[in-house]
């Protein structure tokens, strides 16, 4: 074992980000080590990952799933623990250097919080941590002197582009969006979208929840909110452009008019690797651009009328408080209802707006209040969809 290796904990190792993270670690030549892996119910894949990566510890957060799995093939020396508390303890262990927060949804906030509480560097793929608890999470990071490094391709691009100038020189950031599979659809066509249609993303391979968010552009709304807290921006400093090729991952405009962009093929292994190796760059396994081929780098403004989620994201970013928790909880429940054929595609965003408008708003909430708002919003959507 390389004793100089950076110890990495991957929260949500069986998801798409977690799997890509393990590819990056495996290709690091020993400079990165998978110290700990966690999963919720996908225990068979977690076992296979443990066999391949030989981490020190693995955690299954669902006790029932853990008890139903045959662990006899777990490699010697790999410790198994069960429960959410075990995952939080793993994230805070003294030997851990970086925690990859890759659990989908607001469930990822707990792990992010535990890692920051312990002063760890967090490679943040769980945007909901900042959507739900933005100012609280950033304040905790400041108090514990912990770094938050973005793994989302858009925020990773902004993070890199911001190194071209001083923070006070930034005029705005421009987040790019593929536009999803329905960017040219009329309102009438959007009303006919099926679950199968929405799950067929043209450029990215993601889990079902994130794929639906990409189709409604709610993912970009959540990224607006995340960028507001992560980079300490005002909502009027955040813009969105549609870029179907997903090569320009985002841009930063400076006061003098210069625009710095980060480009690469749509491969999450690049922003993951940069977050794990920052401030250094090294050879990696991510796809590279082919400079022998012509490229179409089309940029176009979004249609706020057809995709009201973007306007909603800007409103929530401006409101702050518990607004992020309300919109996140409502969206997660609405997407689940759509996938279960209990809600139409065009109803997802209006349902979220309705929940946001009636939620009990707190301008300066505690962590308990934002978590309660998230739970309340989910229940409100369930009530609407029954």
Image (tube, rainbow, N blue to C red):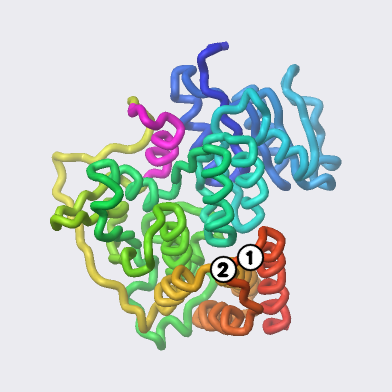
**Helix, strand or loop under label 2:** loop
The picture quadrant where one finds residue 51 is top right
Whichever of callouts 1 and 2 sits on the residue coming sooner in the sequence is 2
Q: Left of 347 or right of it: where is 38? A: right
Is the magenta region chiefly helix, strand or loop?
helix
Residue occupying the point 47% across, 19% down: 31
Residue pointed to by mark 2 = 321
- Residue 222, horizontal then vertical, whole percent: 48, 64
Looking at this view, is 186 or 29 the one in front? 29
**Rendered residue at 14%/57% (across/down):** 257
Instruction: Please identify the quarter of the rendering in which residue 187 is found.
Output: bottom left
Q: Relative to residue 188, is residue 3 depicted above or below?
A: above
Q: Position of residue 329 (x, y in %)?
A: 63, 68
Give the camera-side residue of 20 and 351. Answer: 351
Q: Are marks 1 and 2 in contact (CB under 8 Å)?
A: yes
Left or right position of 108 against 151: right
Q: Which residue is mark 1?
A: 365
Does residue 273 belong to the magenta stretch?
A: yes
Image quarter hosting the C terminus: bottom right
**Residue 219 placed where, x, y %?**
46, 63
Q: Is 176 on the left or on the right of 258, as rendered? A: right
Q: Where, by quadrant of the figure, is residue 183 drawn?
A: bottom left
Residue 80 appears left or right of 117 = right
For the N terminus, the quadrant is top right
* Residue 339 visible at all: no
Q: Which residues are magenta?
A: 267-281
Does the segment drawn in magenta span residue 91? no
**Residue pictured at 64% horizontal, 74% vertical:** 337
Is residue 275 depicted above or below 32 in this figure?
below
């Amino acid at each position: 074992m390389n004793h100089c290796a950076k110890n990495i904990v991957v929260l949500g190792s069986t998801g798409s980000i977690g799997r890509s993270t393990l590819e990056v670690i495996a290709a690091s030549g020993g400079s990165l080590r998978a110290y700990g892996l966690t999963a919720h119910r996908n225990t068979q894949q977690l076992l296979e990952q443990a066999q391949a990566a030989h981490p020190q510890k693995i955690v299954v957060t669902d006790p029932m799933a853990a008890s139903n799995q045959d662990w006899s093939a777990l490699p010697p020396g790999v410790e198994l623990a069960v429960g959410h508390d075990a995952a939080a303890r793993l994230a805070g262990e003294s030997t851990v250097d970086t925690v990859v927060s890759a659990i989908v949804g607001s469930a990822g906030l707990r792990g992010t919080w535990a890692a920051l509480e312990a002063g760890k560097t967090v490679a943040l793929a769980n945007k909901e941590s900042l959507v739900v608890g933005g100012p609280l999470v950033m304040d905790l990071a400041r108090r514990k002197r912990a770094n938050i490094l973005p793994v989302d391709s858009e925020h990773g691009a902004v993070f890199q582009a911001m190194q071209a100038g001083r923070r006070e020189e930034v005029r705005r950031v421009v987040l790019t969006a593929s536009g999803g599979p329905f960017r040219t659809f009329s309102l009438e066509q959007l009303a006919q979208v099926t679950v199968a249609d929405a799950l067929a993303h043209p450029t990215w391979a993601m889990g079902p929840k994130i794929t639906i968010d990409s189709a409604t552009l709610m993912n970009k709304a959540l990224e607006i909110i995340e960028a507001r807290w992560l980079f300490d921006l005002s909502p009027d400093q955040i813009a969105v452009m549609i870029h179907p090729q997903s090569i320009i991952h985002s841009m930063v405009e400076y006061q003098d008019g210069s625009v710095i962009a980060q480009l690469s093929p749509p491969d999450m292994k690049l922003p993951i690797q940069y977050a794990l190796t920052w401030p250094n760059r090294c050879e990696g396994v991510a796809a590279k651009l082919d400079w022998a081929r012509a490229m179409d780098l089309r940029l176009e403004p979004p249609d706020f009328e057809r995709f009201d989620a973007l306007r909603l994201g800007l409103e929530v970013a401006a409101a702050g408080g518990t607004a992020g928790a309300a919109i996140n909880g409502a969206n997660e429940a609405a997407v689940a209802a759509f996938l279960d054929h209990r809600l139409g595609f065009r109803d997802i965003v209006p349902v979220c707006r309705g929940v946001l408008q009636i939620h009990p708003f707190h301008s300066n909430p505690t962590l308990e209040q934002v978590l309660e708002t998230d739970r309340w919003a989910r229940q409100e959507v369930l009530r609407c969809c029954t």
